[in-house]
Image (spheres, rainbow, N blue to C red):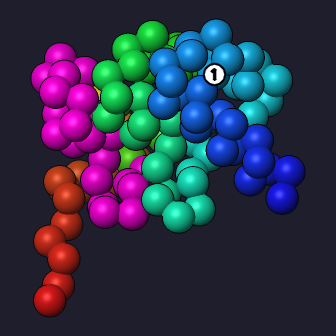
């Protein structure tokens, strides 16, 4: 329960663009890849979607992000940066990080999978 509460606070800080708070959570050992139980969004997804570039920088600088995590809709952070954040530069940067991580793990990266009927 405590982890869920902290997770909600961590994700809320990312949504508000509060880079110092997000950085403090990470410095204290909170996992930067924490996913909301309902939406499966991470701080990376949220900060990309709301164009919180300072939070994105904190997350990228920590060096621990899993760029291949998908939200409940099967979307990568780069897709949210483009679709909701209207931030093509962040989408390109995240897309590059996703491709490099996928390549390093021997994974074939695809965009959002098509949902079956």
Q: Is residue 88 magenta?
A: yes
Q: Is residue 68 magenta?
A: no
Q: Residue at x 31, y 47 (%)?
A: 76
Q: Which residues are magenta?
A: 69-93
Looking at the image, residue 19 sits to the left or right of residue 100; the answer is: right
Q: Is residue 69 above or below residue 74?
A: above
x 49%, y 57%: residue = 40
- Residue at screen point 45% across, 10% down: 54
In the rendered image, is residue 44 in sight?
no
Q: Within 10 angstroms of label 1, few (less than 14), some, or many (20 or more) residues?
A: many
Q: Describe residue 43's horizontal placement relative to residue 116 as left or right.
A: right
Is 117 placed left or right of 21 in the picture?
Answer: left
Q: Quadrant of the N terminus?
A: bottom right
Extreme bottom residue here? Answer: 117
* Of 32 and 14, the residue lying toward us: 14
Q: Quadrant of the C terminus?
A: bottom left
x, y (%) of residue 108? Answer: 23, 55
Count of number-bearing discs? 1
Under circle 1, the secondary element is: helix
Q: Residue 85: x percent and y percent?
A: 24, 29
Residue 15 horizontal/vertical position (percent): 48, 30
Q: Which residue is mark 1?
A: 22
Can you tell which quarter of the image residue 11 is in?
top right
Residue toward you, 108 or 72: 72
Q: Quadrant of residue 46?
A: top left
Residue 69, can we see it?
Answer: yes
| Residue drawn at (39%, 19%) of the image | 52
């Amino acid at each position: 329960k405590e982890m869920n509460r902290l997770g909600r606070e961590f994700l809320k800080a990312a949504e508000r663009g509060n880079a110092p708070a997000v950085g403090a959570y990470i410095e204290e050992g909170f996992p930067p890849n924490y996913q909301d139980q309902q939406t499966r969004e991470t701080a990376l997804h949220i900060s990309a979607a709301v164009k919180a570039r300072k939070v994105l920088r904190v997350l990228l600088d920590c060096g621990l992000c899993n760029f291949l995590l998908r939200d409940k809709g099967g979307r990568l952070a780069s897709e949210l940066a483009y679709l909701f954040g209207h931030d093509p530069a962040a989408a390109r940067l995240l897309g590059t990080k996703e491709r490099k991580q996928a390549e390093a793990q021997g994974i074939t990266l695809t965009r959002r999978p098509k949902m079956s009927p």
